[in-house]
Amino acid sequence: MELYLKKEKHGEFCPERTTKAVLSSLGDDGLQLYSRGLFWRAQYDTRALMFRLKKNQIVPPVRYLLVLHELSDEEELSISPEKSAIADLSKRRLHSTPRISYAGSPLPWKDSIKYLGIIFSKTNENGAIVKNLRAKALRKISAFRTIDYKSYGPRTKDLVSITNNGICSLFYYSCAITNKLSQTHFKICDTVQTTALRVALGLPIWTPNVVLLKIAGQEILSGKIKRLAIQFFIKQVANGIHSPLFLQSSNPCIRLKKDQEAFVGLLADLNISSDQIITLPNILDVLHNDICEIHLPSFDFQDKAQPMSMIKALFEETISEEFQDYFIIAANASKSHLHISIAGTSNLRSFSFRIHPIDSIFTAEALAICQAIDDLSVPDSDLLILTDSFSVLQALKNISLKSLKVILHLAYKILMRTKYNKKIALVWTPGHSSTWNERADSLAKNVTESDLYIEWITVDDICSYYSKFSIQKPIENFRNSKYLEILGDLPSILSFAPWLKNRRENIIITRILTRMIITQLFCTDLDFTTTLFALCAIKKTPSNIFS
């Protein structure tokens, strides 16, 4: 949360006003530590990062923590878990260290604090952050080389995983900070990544980056940092009032220019607004209550190995014996190359709608149940909901705070419905078994462009779509480059790794495919200066390469 302080008329610094502004920024539901009748004004940014941008440098807000030592010994600063912020100590020393705790546990002040996956350092300059990360990455690359040279050592695909999880992760775990870097600093990040990938693949240093990323099947590190930062903020939008990063008095927004532009651009590309994103429900009682009955394979008709006629007969028998007085609703979803749709039916009425095309079939099945509860339920009766989505019911049965937002949304819908229905039961039915659920399935498959469109989308599907789109960028860059004509459409190292026996074969095949089997010294001895690929341009066979 970035803090902008209003100065006095004569431009003097007011410690009391700053103290109150800092304490207020730690949350409206935090401790009211400062009770003096002072007039103050402050504007919040929706970021939890205590930084602001000025001339491409990260600088701390105006002396916002230097007054904490003035608090009396009886006062203790406590950061509530719901509305929290990390404050920076800058380079000045305090006479006494402020006592700061989070959720009742003291937070020790060190050189840096890691919070919400973000590292907050005492030195807030981009250069210092990048220099520290780069030094750590280079040390890891040096250790990386010791296991790389062995001919029968780790496989290349495993070394690529180590590159991502052990070297590049240093940069994108702090993506909410590093996405503010300048282009020069981003080039440093990319150089670290390409250096590590060349070691992992066994390719020489003059291998073009476009070729390197294509055969490694990786997206460029600077692009991944920006993508993960945007995904971070999208997830905070989905957390709703439970997010510590967004004020809920108005529409959620990001006031830092880079993040705002990227966030708005992504929503525009998907043709959606932030209001269409399914958010975390305000009431989290769904995590503690058994709000409904969930029947996974517990009845005889749920055995898919039986003949269809037997399943239908056992289903009707189970309904008449176990759910005789229940009002029955069936919900289903369908996804095709044209659109994705949901449908529901009962004895009284039915519905069918289109939803956003990037929603997954899992999301669609859950949303079909949500819509069926809203449109088809009747009050003052027991409710039976049939669905052929085993995964949705399993996720609902094992619900937790880390569950997908659509599952939490479904649980909240069911919880609200318990006010009007005595009992609610969800039963899994095998697909294509001539039961009630087949009616809903037929309605969903027959949806056309003229049917009503519901603007629902989940943050999980947005992030999944964004990830797939970003991973395709190296492929597009390669296909638009001059190397496509020379090398052809290169496969990824991961695609043919299962057929290679050892590390030595990995390196040989990789160099053959990229035409990097010829060394720079060999080209110099032949006084060949046009292109490194020309020696293999006449015949693209391994025999020509080795000759």
Image (cartoon, helix red, strand yellow):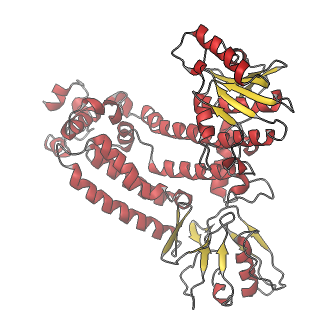
Nearest the eye: 363 or 247:
363
Which quarter of the rendering shows the C terminus? top left
Instruction: Specify the farthest residue to the top.
Output: 309
Nearest the eye: 342 or 224:
342
Total marks in image: 0
The picture places residue 370, in percent across and down from the top left corner, at 74, 33
> In the rendered view, would you say 338 is above or below 57?
above
Q: Is residue 64 visible?
A: no
For the point 79% across and 30% down, the residue is 382
The picture places residue 352, in percent across and down from the top left corner, at 76, 22
The picture places residue 194, in percent across and down from the top left corner, at 36, 49
> In the rendered view, would you say 318 is above or below 218?
above
Q: Is residue 419 visible?
A: yes
Give the side of residue 112 with respect to residue 523, left or right. Answer: right
Give the side of residue 375 with respect to residue 119, left or right. Answer: right
The picture places residue 362, in percent across and down from the top left corner, at 61, 31
Nearest the eye: 426 or 467:
426
For the point 26% across and 36% down, the residue is 510
Give the side of residue 516 with respect to residue 225, left or right. Answer: left
For the point 69% across and 15% down, the residue is 316
Give the side of residue 199 with respect to residue 252, left or right. Answer: left
To which quarter of the image does residue 478 belong? top left
For the point 53% across and 72% down, the residue is 124
Which quarter of the rendering shows the N terminus? bottom right
> In the rendered view, would you say 250 is above or below 351?
below
Nearest the eye: 501 or 509:
501
